[in-house]
Image (spheres, coloured by chain):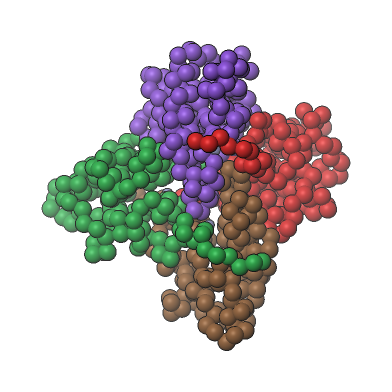
Chain colours: A red, B purple, C green, D brown
């Protein structure tokens, strides 16, 4: 699916993936035991890490992708070039719908989103396919509801 | 896109759309002024209506689609055959990512989801195209994260 | 603490508590295994039941109290006289903060909220204290942030 | 109410309040236009800033207090000594219930929470009372539901 996303350099990709693995170490996954790490690459070359932070209410839980985004936006950083996400599962798992909607608010439709399997380093070491699913919010949230929809003219009721 | 969803009878479709419009009347859209109505058709032929219920915290807001689903599930109803959603905008608008994730938990991948424009009745009266986008959770939430992903074997950290 | 809430008749109280236990039967607590039931008494004497409906995203979870409230409000019912909540734990447990904020939007500060232990029926049968904590949103969410705070004049930035 | 919280030095208090005002500058309050800033003081003397980051879905919105907390926790910082919160309103406004529940997960019951009016600097310059409400999660979320409640023995259903 790479054709539908921007290109990302091999070096950026490698750094971003490593950061997502590091981010996962700080997951607070007390209830699900399902750790997730995310890393955002900003237009000016910074990497911002997020992890899932769960809550006893369950509903208050904030995922890794949203954690990374609020860290960036609350520092005034709103321009991003890619996002990587990793879990403890040995296949490429995808963001939940809440995170897709949150990504939609701040990231371009074609920004690369790299879904990285937990055994990525092993795969690479063995010379196998890396198992990454490269996608985008255009693909993950088609017909998306976005900020501009709230601006549309409304019919009188 | 109808090919990728189940079929729904013209009569069911018509009743479901009417119910979604009625549901919208009870929206509590105090902050966005953006009213949404949803109607779920259950396997045993009941129609369950939902509207968006907003909250001063903004983050506490519950959309129409989720309202309809929790109404059903909390009465022990967990089998659905279609969903219709309508807003005050004269085009087919799509559920937010939070609702897509919630629909994913309870509805089949190919269950028809009808996104209905606010001027649907006018369009039909004028003999125009009805403007409905018929879609499904398979289309709206590709590569979805779901309950079974939480069951997958995890790598030791 | 009853002095700070409205009074509720013994018969209403009994019906409401029974409804909260029934509501719990439809909890969808797939992830936490922590079932919660809620029952709302409306001004016109209806009882509306809610249960917690969890989600694989965790963050998408909707608690029993919010389920009961959106069921009511989406049917045009916005006036309530009491709420009962029960879990599977043999002591009075309290709503999470998300639900307190949601209750704040629709219920009066002094409306009785009955937190019912799972062994309530046993306690009553044995002639013991019923173990109910009767409280209110005034007590559970002091200095609350509410709809009127969004209307306050704001300083130029 | 200071008696029920820990003490905080005048110098820390002053730095924390200043940081909360700075944090507010990066609010993404596109929908509510209601900007909020928060600042957390960590045990090792760092200050971590948060702002509210809203979302077109409304329900996806993350408040300033939660932004500050996930920034900290996702960097491995989980020990805090105080929190300050400021809005654009010239009086002390309080966290929403969602944030209270999130603070409950990570902060001590008696940790000082300073609710700062937008005109704080003016008040101080004029030699008036500073208008700060000093509170704590013990006061803001009484009878709280917390992580340990999920561990309690449950009755068979
Ligand atoms: Zn997520
Ligand atoms: Zn929604
Ligand atoms: Zn709750
Ligand atoms: Zn909040």
The residue under the point 79% across, 30% down is A4
Specify whether B11 is left or right of A101: left
Say if B137 sits above or below C132 in the image. Answer: above
Q: Nearer the viewer, residue C146 or A105?
A: C146
Q: Residue at x 58, y 50 (%)?
A: D61
Q: Position of residue B19 (x, y in %)?
A: 43, 26
Q: Would residue C118 be found to the left or right of residue A115 on screen?
A: left
Residue B148 point in image, percent of width and height: 54, 31
- Horizontal and vertical percent position of residue C103: 39, 51
Most extreme residue toward the bottom is: D127
User: Residue shown at 49%/13% (left/top)?
Assistant: B10
Numbered-mark total: 0
Q: Residue at x 71, y 59 (%)?
A: A75
Relative side of A153 to B28, left or right: right
Does D136 sit above or below residue C35? Answer: below
Height in image: D87 above or below C16?
Answer: below
Q: Is residue D139 visible?
A: yes
Instruction: Tell me which corner region of the image, top left, top right, bottom left or bottom right, holds residue B28.
Output: top left
Relative to D50, is C48 above or below?
above
Quarter of the image where the N terminus of chain C is located = bottom left
Which quadrant holds the C terminus of chain C?
bottom right
Q: Quadrant of residue A148?
A: top right
- Say whether residue B152 is visible: no
Residue B27 image point, x, y percent: 46, 40
């Amino acid at each position: 699916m790479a054709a539908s996303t921007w290109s990302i350099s091999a070096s950026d990709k490698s750094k971003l993936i490593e950061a997502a693995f590091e981010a996962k170490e700080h997951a607070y996954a007390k209830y699900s035991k399902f750790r997730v790490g995310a890393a955002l690459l900003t237009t000016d070359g910074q990497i911002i890490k997020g992890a899932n932070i769960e809550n006893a209410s369950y509903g208050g839980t904030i995922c890794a992708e949203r954690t990374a985004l609020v860290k960036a936006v609350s520092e005034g950083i709103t321009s991003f070039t890619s996002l990587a996400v990793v879990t403890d599962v040995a296949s490429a798992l995808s963001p939940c719908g809440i995170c897709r909607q949150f990504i939609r608010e701040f990231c371009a439709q074609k920004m690369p989103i790299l879904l990285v399997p937990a055994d990525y380093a092993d795969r690479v070491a063995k010379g196998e396919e890396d198992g990454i699913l490269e996608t985008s919010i255009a693909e993950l949230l088609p017909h998306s509801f976005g900020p501009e929809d709230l601006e549309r003219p409304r019919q009188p009721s």
